[in-house]
């Protein structure tokens, strides 16, 4: 699998959203973090912003829903044209049903796990998802440090996907930078969210390229 870079726009200059998206137009997809101040202790934005990013036509959208009751809200993100919709395992009442609903609408379905949530209870339904998001920080804020203990979870998840003969992506989100991306790639991640690493860089475009090169050089063979 080739490495995919998904810059998070959480801490970009929202007053110049089009300009910020243009800076990352060389990335694969734009990561849009939706926070409801209940599932996580922070509030960002919702459907209108996700839809505006889709409509900008600059990049496809990877929606990361850090919200309660995704069973109710996630399908709307697929309906407005997000290419990929990821909801949290801890928040979904019926993750399998929701994944099928997202597929029926035409989006890719992602399942996100907070740092203390194990992959084991979801191994039997991995085939229902296009992507597993392993949070490498506690969700809620950008700019936090990568949690090293997540490396074995990435490895276990990759082993379970390989054992089942599936082609499921593993996304990592939180603290991904030039110093952490290689370890995450070696462990089995192939989709990398980077917020502060990209938007605090002098040249966001070059940073995306640098991250992609490092990830591809260390991608585990599968
Ligand atoms: C955090 C969000 C992340 C965040 C990542 O809860 O899900 O996508 O923007 O930011 P960095 O890359 O700065 O850790
Ligand atoms: Zn995110």
Image (cartoon, grey):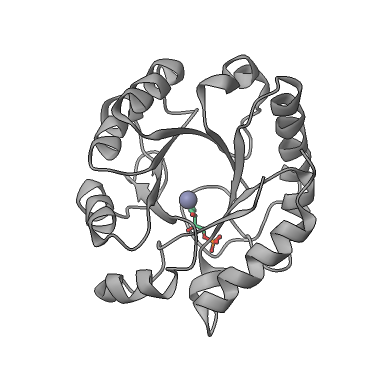
x%, y% of residue 157?
A: 70, 31
Compared to residue 123, the image places residue 67 above or below, namely: below
Compared to residue 211, the image places residue 118 above or below, namely: above
Viewer-side residue, 219 vs 16: 219
Q: Quadrant of the N terminus?
A: top right
Horizontally, residue 161 falls left or right of residue 34, namely: right
x%, y% of residue 12?
A: 39, 70
* Residue 178 image-quadrant placement: bottom right
Q: Quadrant of the C terminus?
A: top right
x%, y% of residue 40?
A: 42, 44
* Residue 145 image-quadrant placement: bottom right
**Which residue corresponds to the image point at 57% horizontal and 20% vertical from the top-left?**
127
Horizontally, residue 215 falls left or right of residue 112, namely: right
Viewer-side residue, 36 vs 89: 89
**Which residue corresponds to the image point at 25% horizontal and 62% vertical from the top-left?**
56
Instruction: Count how many numbered circles sit on residues in the image.
Output: 0
x%, y% of residue 117?
A: 61, 31
Viewer-side residue, 41 vs 174: 174
Point out the residue furthest to the bottom here: 202
């Amino acid at each position: 699998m080739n490495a995919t870079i998904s810059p998070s726009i959480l801490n970009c200059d929202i007053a110049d959203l089009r300009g910020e998206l243009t800076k990352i137009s060389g990335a694969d997809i734009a990561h849009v973090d939706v926070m409801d101040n209940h599932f996580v202790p922070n509030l960002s934005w919702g459907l209108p912003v996700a839809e505006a990013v889709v409509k900008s036509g600059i990049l496809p959208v990877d929606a990361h829903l850090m919200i309660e009751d995704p069973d109710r809200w996630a399908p709307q993100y697929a309906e407005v044209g997000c290419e990929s919709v990821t909801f949290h395992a801890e928040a979904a009442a019926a993750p399998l049903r929701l994944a099928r609903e997202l597929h029926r609408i035409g989006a890719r379905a992602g399942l996100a796990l907070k740092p203390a949530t194990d992959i084991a209870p979801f191994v039997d339904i991995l085939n229902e998802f296009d992507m597993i998001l392993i949070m490498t920080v506690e969700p809620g804020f950008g700019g936090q440090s990568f949690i090293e203990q997540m490396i074995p979870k990435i490895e276990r998840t990759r082993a379970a996907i390989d054992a089942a003969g599936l082609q499921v992506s593993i996304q990592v989100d939180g603290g991904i930078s030039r110093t952490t991306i290689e370890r995450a790639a070696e462990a089995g991640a192939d989709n990398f969210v980077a917020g502060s690493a990209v938007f605090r860089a002098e040249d966001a475009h070059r940073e995306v390229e640098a991250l992609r090169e490092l990830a591809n050089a260390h991608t585990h063979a599968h």
